[in-house]
Amino acid sequence: MSNHHLLSLAARTNPTTKTAARAALKAAGLKQTLAPDLLSAAAQINQARSSARQNRIIRRLGHAVAMHRPTGRLPVRLRPYTLAQRLYAKRQCAVLDTLLQLIDHHRHGAWRCELTDDPACVGVKYLRHYTGEKAGKWAIEDIETFITVPTDWRVRVQRRGLAIVDGMMTLDASPLEAHGCELYAAVFARRTGAKNVAVERGYIARSDDGISYHGATAEQALTGLAKKRRQHALIARLDAADLSTLVDQCRSATVHVGDARATGACVYGIRSWCATVGLPTTYDEASGKLSGSAPLAQVYAAYQREPRPEARATILRVLRRQRHLHHQLTNP
């Protein structure tokens, strides 16, 4: 008599006494002397059924289970973190994964994520570790960067589709009342170099068609969004234009930051794009003014590497200006 047949009979009849076990064995045409074995099999099945829910919870929590899988391999053994600890780690991973879209923090020092319930703590801070004096100066061993976001960042920012907006990472966003668009009081980080980010506090306006604008004030964000939408409508009409041919005709033209500002691009977006593609700009913290220029051919090459709509609008503006100037010179 195999164990399998006894387990199958015990699962069907579930005897609890010797009399019931003998009756079940007799009905199955088996020896009644197997009654103790049948009762033992039934007890094993009942115990497994009673602890099934608890075992399922343990497996989902990641605790090690002292049993072999049918494949013969041991299950993956995870450290027994609590649910709160695992949720905290999941929130941190969501922030750091989003940060990877802005900067390769795996290659540039140690980056840490902190969660907070204090809005004033949202931002980025750096911790420098000094090793000692070297050549008369203090030598820096390493720099740890801490990015702090609200505890419910995934709900406040990520699920609203604001994690990355116009090349900048949103650290916090609070919705405000606005007509015809979405408006948020926000904290956002922009890339300032190969491994650095800067944090700004301002506003984000976003339309239903996904166009967005960063501004220092709510009025700037709303006005900039309206202007940017008009520019995007113009870009849509000129989308079929062959930029390569037009740029070849005006390669000596110069693109200024003012051209980008005239198309509706915000200062933060311009600085973010220029830092990404390596174009030089100068920002005056005192006046908040941004300056810089580059040849049209260089800007177009950068646009081909990082094709943002605002860059295309700027190139088209310069091309229109050059064509207008050429028309004036040839038709005095």
Image (cartoon, rainbow, N blue to C red):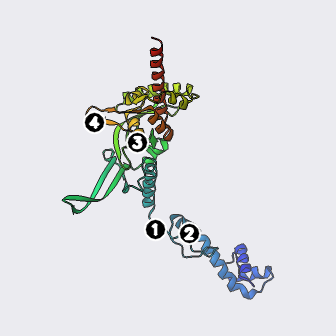
Q: CA distance from mark 4 to mark 1?
A: 49 Å
Q: Quadrant of the N terminus?
A: bottom right
Q: Which of the two discs, 1 and 3, sits closer to the camera?
A: 3
Q: Is residue 246 left or right of residue 284?
A: right
Image height of 259 relative to 100, above or below: above
In primary-sequence order, the first of circles 2 and 4 is 2
In primary-sequence order, the first of circles 1 and 3 is 1
Q: CA distance from mark 2 to mark 1?
A: 14 Å
**In the depicted view, which residue is nearer to us: 161 or 18?**
161
Name the image quarter holding residue 298: top left
Q: Residues within 10 Å of mark 3 (few under 14, many from 20)?
A: few
Residue linked to disc 1: 80
Q: Which of the two discs, 2 and 4, sits closer to the camera?
A: 4
Badge 2 vs badge 4, beta-carbon distance below 8 Å: no
Helix, strand or loop at label 3? It is: loop
Residue linked to disc 4: 285
Q: Which mark is residue 278?
A: 3
Q: CA distance from mark 3 to mark 2?
A: 56 Å
Q: CA distance from mark 4 to mark 3?
A: 20 Å
**In the depicted view, which residue is nearer to us: 212 or 300?**
300
Residue linked to disc 2: 55
Three-letter residue code for mark 4: Glu
Three-letter residue code for mark 2: Asn
